[in-house]
Amino acid sequence: MADVPKGFTIKTKGFKTVIVEDKLGEGGQGAVYQVDYDGQPKALKWYSGKKLKDPEKFYENLKNNIKKGAPTPAFLWPEDITEKEGEAFGYIMKMRPVEYKDFSLFLLAKEKFASVTAMVNAALHITAGFRELHNRGYSYQDLNDGNFFVNPKSGEVLICDNDNVAMYGENLGIGGKCRYTAPEIVLGKALPSIHTDKFSLAVVLFLLFMNNHPLEGKKAYPPCMTEELEKQIYGAEPLFIFDPEDHANAPVPGINNNAIKRWPAYPRYIQEKFIAAFSKQALTDPSYRIIEKDWLRQFIRLRGEIYKCDGCGEIFFADAIQPTLCPKCRKSKLFALYLKTPQYNVPIHQKTRFYNCHTETDSDDFLTRTGEVSLNKESGGFELKNISTKSWYITNGSTQRTLGPNEVIPLHKGMSIDFGGCTAEIS
Ligand SMILES: [Zn+2]
């Protein structure tokens, strides 16, 4: 069956009736339709069966994933699967909300993030989604820019095409999109796994921040691109465009302008993480690749350092302790106070927000807000409001007090805050 006609009706394994409405799009393996799923609007991804290497294994894998359920709400996960219609079949998933845009559009500059915070949030959401997936023993296998939908205002992410997701050790014969696959897959030495997912994740993150592929510098622009050259760039001789020692694949002015312009805007610790993620060792040995928890920590720190210049209004990343020069007007910013937690140093200004990752021990929850800083116009000092559900214990010199939910306290240097298990200091 090629296109599924409007009105086509089929039963699912979950004993529901699916009526096909409009076609929404087409991918390499199948097409997506809007359907009526027992009265609810849902999406159906339909496979003719002919483009799949092993349709039976694919069908069984989908059934298993449906049974196990989505790792987090960020996944547009298969919810039900249809009966077979000859060789063809499809699975049901939620409709994508209209405010979510295809990630590849951001890379083509056809979509823009509303703010730097939204962009860093997207990095956090993508990384957290993959951590959950991997923690549950799955590998994604085919991670690329076509798999994400991003909300440009909030940076929230929906991860789609979860049909290729398989348990660790399983392989569905998915090669992956060449520019996103780990060198060992390009060379035919390995099959997709959690280790190769880590490489693809680093590529997606680099693309998100720099809008340039990490391996596409000087070497990627010969007069004529051949399959052999492609194998060399992504497989046999991959080289990071910002490799600090080997400049043979450095960015080319006029071609790699995004990378040239954006790279210096990021703090050294972000640059170092990408240098490590695409070092010669990490490109050849999967054990050197960056784990998701490590990325999350860097991005939590980065989000806390987003600052709007007092002089010119430019947004830049300002260090919590050291003075940072505004890249536009060169005015220096040094924060009077910062929160020193066991994990992070968070600059204090009137837009500072604390999350669970700051106020709980060993938490990577970057979504739940727990504290809010504001400027007291009368005193000219900063105040902290407890917006968590816990009581905090404040020690300021010889005085101690409890700060209950919704209570506010002026912040002073040397103050210690026990958030309930995790103690931080105002420095
Ligand atoms: Zn400035």
Image (tube, rainbow, N blue to C red):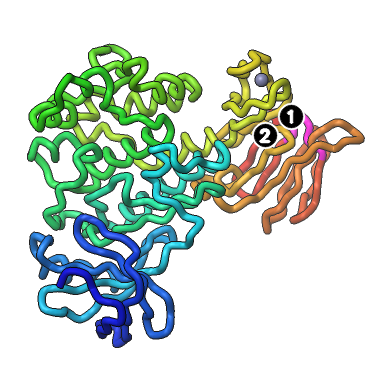
Name the residue located 9 percent from the left edge and 35 percent from the top edge: 187
Please tell me how crowded label 2 is: few (under 14), some (14-19), or many (20+) other residues with Cα within 10 Å.
Answer: many
Q: Is residue 68 visible?
A: no
Name the residue located 52 percent from the left edge and 41 percent from the top edge: 113
- Numbered badge on residue 425: 2
Q: Quadrant of residue 117?
A: top right
User: Of the residues under marks 2 and 1, which one precedes in the sequence?
Assistant: 1
- Residue 245, compared with residue 95, is above or below; it is above
Of residue 409 and residue 311, the one placed in the foreground of this image is: 311
Q: Is residue 200 left or right of residue 404?
A: left
Which x, y percent locates residue 209? 43, 33
Name the residue located 22 percent from the left edge and 59 percent from the top edge: 167
Q: Is mark 2 within 8 Å of ligand 1?
A: no
Of residue 269 and residue 150, the one placed in the foreground of this image is: 150
Q: Is residue 419 left or right of residue 211?
A: right
Looking at this view, name the residue that lies furthest to the right.
Answer: 378
- Residue 70, compared with residue 410, is above or below; it is below
* Residue topped by disc 1: 414
Q: Quadrant of residue 275?
A: top left
- Secondary structure that dominates the magenta span: loop
The amino acid sitting under disc 1 is Gly
Q: Is residue 421 visible?
A: yes
The amino acid sitting under disc 2 is Glu
Q: Which residues are magenta?
A: 410-415
Q: Quadrant of the C terminus?
A: top right
**Labelled pair 2, 1 in contact (Cβ < 8 Å):** yes
Which x, y percent locates residue 222? 18, 20
Name the residue located 25 percent from the left edge and 57 percent from the top edge: 27
Which x, y percent locates residue 174? 15, 52
Ligand 1 lies in quarter: top right
